[in-house]
Image (tube, rainbow, N blue to C red):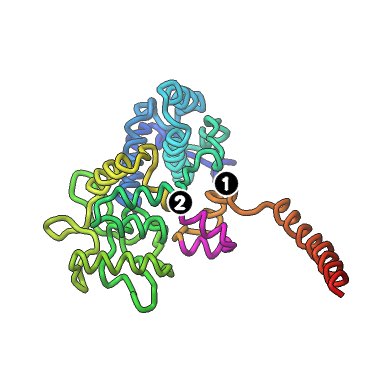
Amino acid sequence: MTASVVTGSYVDPRAGRTTFDAYFRGWAERQVWAPMTEVSMDLARRKVTFGSVPIASLRASHLETWVKAMVAAGYAPNTVATRVNAVRAVLKSAVRDRVIAVDPSVGLRLPARRRAEHAMEIPTPDQIRALIDGSRPSMRAYLGVCAFAGLRLGEASGLNREDVDFLGRRLHVRRQVQRRRGGPAELRQPKYGSERTIYLPDRLVEMLARHVERTGTAMEGWLFHTADGRPLPPSTVNSWWQSTVRAAGTPALHLHGLRHFYASGLIAAGCDVVTVQRALGHRSPSTTLDTYSHLWPSAEDRTRAAAAGLTDLVFDAAADSVRTEEHD
């Protein structure tokens, strides 16, 4: 005990008598979270199978049994990983607080996730066109800012008329509409503080101009709003989206797929990682790479393209020389 005190590794046995659930609750009260993060974390707390276990008595076997139960219940690997990460955050805090000496989640194995190139859903240009044609006119510009500017659902719903610079062909993302647990939707800063300026293609500017003209949106009015003038809540957007995909004959598509469509277009046009990161509002370039690395050309692709350029220089030049000689 003396050695552990001297080395700073001492853990008071009394501190670990509190249950995992009680420690989780106390830890959660100190965290600064967005509303939906709070909902997700609280769901993880309520779904663990060891909430009544003293946190110092928690073992790797408790977590393994919990993970096995989630897999058996048919939870997707991403859902399992999200809930396990929530528990890991709590356990890491308990280690820092000297409530437990060792994190029992270290080395915990999770079900394998699908590779990004197989799991990612990217609509085709024909599907995007079908969605626009199948949508009611007042929401076509909403599809436009998602598919051609890469906005998230909440960011598109939080657009104000003053956020669109028609002359400069720019769009300023300054806020998002987010669902609040037990209450109406509310306006918040964009996810991860991703306020940004997006440079718009001419056709999207035209779509937005027609939308403003059709709806009579005031200079300081919401571009997409309810009958009483409030920004569209996520529930209303989801309802519209379901009717739109049915009309377009694409029921399996998710609205977030339009953001992937935009990202894939930027990458195909040769944009670098940082450019794509800034356009999408990701926290860091590593987030962009984790999500879209499979869309960038590989070293083999670049090598093949470079070699093709060399062969074109040699053989095209030779062919031109032969044609010139024949004409002479």
Front-most of 29 and 260?
260
First to last magenta residue range: 262-279
For badge 2, the amino acid type reads: Pro
Mark 2 to mark 1 CA distance (whole Å): 65 Å
- Say which of 200 and 153 sits in front: 200
Q: Assess whether residue 181 is covered by the magenta stretch.
A: no
Query: Which residue position is annotated with label 2?
Result: 125
Question: Is disc 1 surrounded by few (<14), some (14 to 19) or many (20+) residues within 10 Å?
Answer: few
- Mark 1: which secondary structure? helix
Q: Residues within 10 Å of mark 2 (few under 14, many from 20)?
A: few
Picture coordinates of residue 59 (x, y %)? 49, 27
Number of callouts in the render?
2
Q: Which residue is drawn at 52% across and 30% down?
A: 111
Of callouts 2 and 1, the N-terminal one: 1
Q: On the picture, is 317 further left or further right than 35?
A: right
Camera-side mark, 2 or 1: 2
| Image quadrant containing the C terminus | bottom right
Name which quarter of the figure residue 3 lies in: top right
| Left or right: 325, with 209 as reference point | right
Residue that appears at 83% across and 68% down: 323
Q: According to the image, label 1 marks what residue?
A: 6
Corner quadrant of residue 165: bottom left
Q: Which mark is residue 181?
A: none
Residue at 78%, 62% (x, y): give it: 312
Q: Which residue lies furthest to the left in this view?
A: 228
- Expressed as whole percent of the image width and height from the top left, the position of residue 205 reads 36, 69
The residue closer to the viewer here, 235 or 312, is 312
Residue 27 percent across, percent down from the top left = 36, 44
